[in-house]
Image (spheres, rainbow, N blue to C red):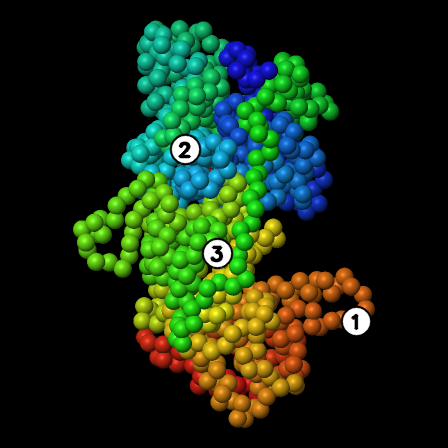
Amino acid sequence: MGMTTLAPIQRLKLLRELERKVLWLSAWTIHHANHLRPNRDGLKVGGHQASCASLATVMTALYFSVLKPEDRIAVKPHASPVFHAIQYLFGHQTQDKLAHFRGLGGAQSYPSRTKDIDDVDFSTGSVGLGVAMTLFSSIVQDYVRLKQLAPADRPTGRMVALVGDAELDEGNVFEALLEGWKHDVRNLWWVIDYNRQSLDGVVNDRLFGRIGEMFGLVGWRVVTLKYGTLLETAFAQADGGHLRDWIDACPNSLYSALVFKGGAGWREALHRDLNQYPGIRRILEQHDDEALHRLMTNLAGNDMQAVLDAFEGIDDDTPTCFIAYTIKGQGLPFAGHKDNHSGLMTLDQMASFKKGMAIDDGAEWDKYAGLKATPAELQGFVDAAPFNARGRRRTQAPTIEIPAALPAPHDRESSTQAGFGKILNAIAAEDSEMARRIVTTSPDVSVSTNLGAWINRRGLFGRTEAEDVFRELKVVSAQLWRETPRGQHIELGIAENNLFIQLAALGISHEIFGTRLLPIGTLYDPFIARGLDALNYACYQDARFMVVATPAGVTLAPEGGAHQSVHTPLIGIGQPGLLSYEPAYVDELAVLMRFGLEHMQQPKGSSIYLRLSTRSLAQPQRTLSAGQQADVVSGGYWYAPPEPGADVAIVCMGAVTPEAIAAHDSIVRDFAGAGLLVLTSPDRLHADWLAAQRNRGRTTGSVDRSASPVERLLAPLSRDARIITVMDGHPLALSWLGSVRGQRVVPLGIETFGQSGDIGDLYRTYKLDAAAIIDAVARAV
Ligand SMILES: Cc1ncc(C[n+]2csc(CCOP(=O)(O)OP(=O)(O)O)c2C)c(N)n1
Ligand SMILES: [Mg+2]
């Protein structure tokens, strides 16, 4: 009993019934959470009944009829209850979780890939980011398809975003549009819920006067769904054109206010403005207030037939923007009111809404109560939805084997950034599965972050072959930038939001497209802050990637204050889902890159952040043993071990390590047995320390104060030893070390924006040089 056998009129009837049910369930889920669950803290639970209502038609049409298994969808965050209601009808969401909406373990406020059980494709929440996510996922879809990395039986899907109209105020949406145009992005559908309202009120009319042109400029098709079938019929009658002109010219705020006022309000306004036309007078006579209201609010985005026609009219892969005129709160008592964004129906309003929906007491969660079609008929239709034709949607992909060691250079002098470039270059020269799965991306800093050699070998990605004109014309350049579908570097314009959303999309490819990728993104460390919400968004949906940030801190020296990163080590520590490292030497970096490529594939793994430097350091002539490699991964090692009971230690991280070594050489004359500890990850050490403390509470018996690596590292020092920490970043990242065993810390680092200068001048100015470290030791003891 497939969809094809159903007559269109019958399908329309069932979809309209389901639209009612979806509207009901979303409103009821929110109502239940706010009014019927015990409230222990007095906080409003919230939920957005009006925002749900405007999308009920579009989402019903999409999920129950239009979408296919290979399509992937980002749902406007505050339409989450509609999404959950639909999944509930599909049998993918439980009544219990709906009843616990916004409660611990319940259906999530905003659709979440990691916390919801109902197959969320893309998490949303921070407006604008989910929209862009579909665009970058479309690039990933092309990437894996053109390289034949995708499972052979996977058809190309459409990446669909259900977008709030006010989301288009977020600049990242336009950054993404421009990038998508450059990459000739395909198979994208953005459906804009044009309800003319945001959170605070009515959206500006002027913006949408231009929105279609903006999409047109970047090669999109724009389909406007403005008037529903009732209004179109009225327009076709005598004088109907005047009615159309009147609505077309009606400002957003007036239209919204009249929607709220209802039939009498429409009558008064039309009588005042159009009464000279006999055709209009006839329309007013033929419609009572209720019918007039239904007519005047019959916008296409809330008209099932119009919505189906629009979606089904598209049969190519041109990116398409549907501007769907809707009414915020359609079908609810506060429809159109400018303050309805977080408005909730009162108990009385809910009672009459429920009556209108023909739902009996106790049947509120019933899947088909109050509908005219029989439950069997509705269930049969729901079960046959093409969306579910291939079962659950979350794909899996095997992990890619990472060799026991990466090919590491053995230069006597090197910066970690140069080492990074060489390690990738050596991987690029290999014929390995790992090399095939690495995909790099960078916002116009590929060359200056040392991706050049990798790109020369592995090529730029483009949907079609493009020549390297400089090469054709024999202009000498170190960079061979030929674009091909085989290329493994996605070059982005300067937009860090785009970098992180591209990494997010690449980093969930195994669960979205069934293809495991090993994404590596590079940028300058300070500009992490520019894309920070997008980075957080990527981590929130458990995308897996490696971000390599370089140069960092004041060590980039001559480039000066604007490019100095001060607090990024704190971001590394504070960002969930991102494990951060700052190696000093290239052999450590090779260990960490190897670990990172493996860790980001583990079910309980995470993304990796490497903070690197352009400062060339004399490399230690050593071969790291397995134990030392493990120490590098767990966060640090004694470069010069302290004598048991030592009273002084220097702890350093990253580019300032030579200064710490020099200071250490100098102080051991006065403080025999002083140690020098090189850290690679305060993030990892801190997390493992806290985890050990939590576990400690659970076990009985003696307290093990050496349960975590940092406790073991600091154990040889005396109880009241002085620890001088030094790093090129905010000193807070290391000052917590004093809490581990109660030893006293003197933290050195950067607290202000810097000057330009050479490294010598800057380290002296910011008290990172050997003299400053020695001075700190002297003052501390
Ligand atoms: C980055 C970000 N800023 C602010 C918010 C708070 N917020 C949630 S919804 C919303 C307004 C959304 O309006 P619109 O996109 O038109 O959605 P509607 O409810 O009208 O469908 C705002 C400001 C957010 N979720 N994310
Ligand atoms: Mg809106």
Between the C-alphas of marks 2 and 3, the distance is 27 Å
Residue 544 spot, x, y in % from top left:
52, 51
Amino acid at pointer 1: Ser
Marker count (numbered): 3
Badge 1: residue crowd in 10 Å (few <14, some 14–19, many ≥20)? few
Name above or below for residue 594 compared with residue 601. Answer: below
- Left or right, 64 with reference to 91: left
Look at 67% across and 17% down and name the residue there: 375
Q: Circle 2 sits on which residue?
A: 187
Amino acid at pointer 2: Asn
Q: Circle 3 sits on which residue?
A: 546
Q: Look at discs 2 and 1 and give the one toward the viewer.
A: 2
Mark before the other along the chain sequence, 1 or 3: 3
Look at 49% across and 19% down and name the residue there: 304
Between the C-alphas of marks 1 and 3, the distance is 40 Å
Name above or below for residue 526 compared with residue 240. Answer: below
SS class of the residue under badge 3? strand
Badge 3: residue crowd in 10 Å (few <14, some 14–19, many ≥20)? many
Between the C-alphas of marks 2 and 1, the distance is 61 Å
Badge 2: residue crowd in 10 Å (few <14, some 14–19, many ≥20)? many
Q: Is mark 1 within 8 Å of ligand 1?
A: no
Residue 2 spot, x, y in % from top left:
57, 17
SS class of the residue under badge 1? loop
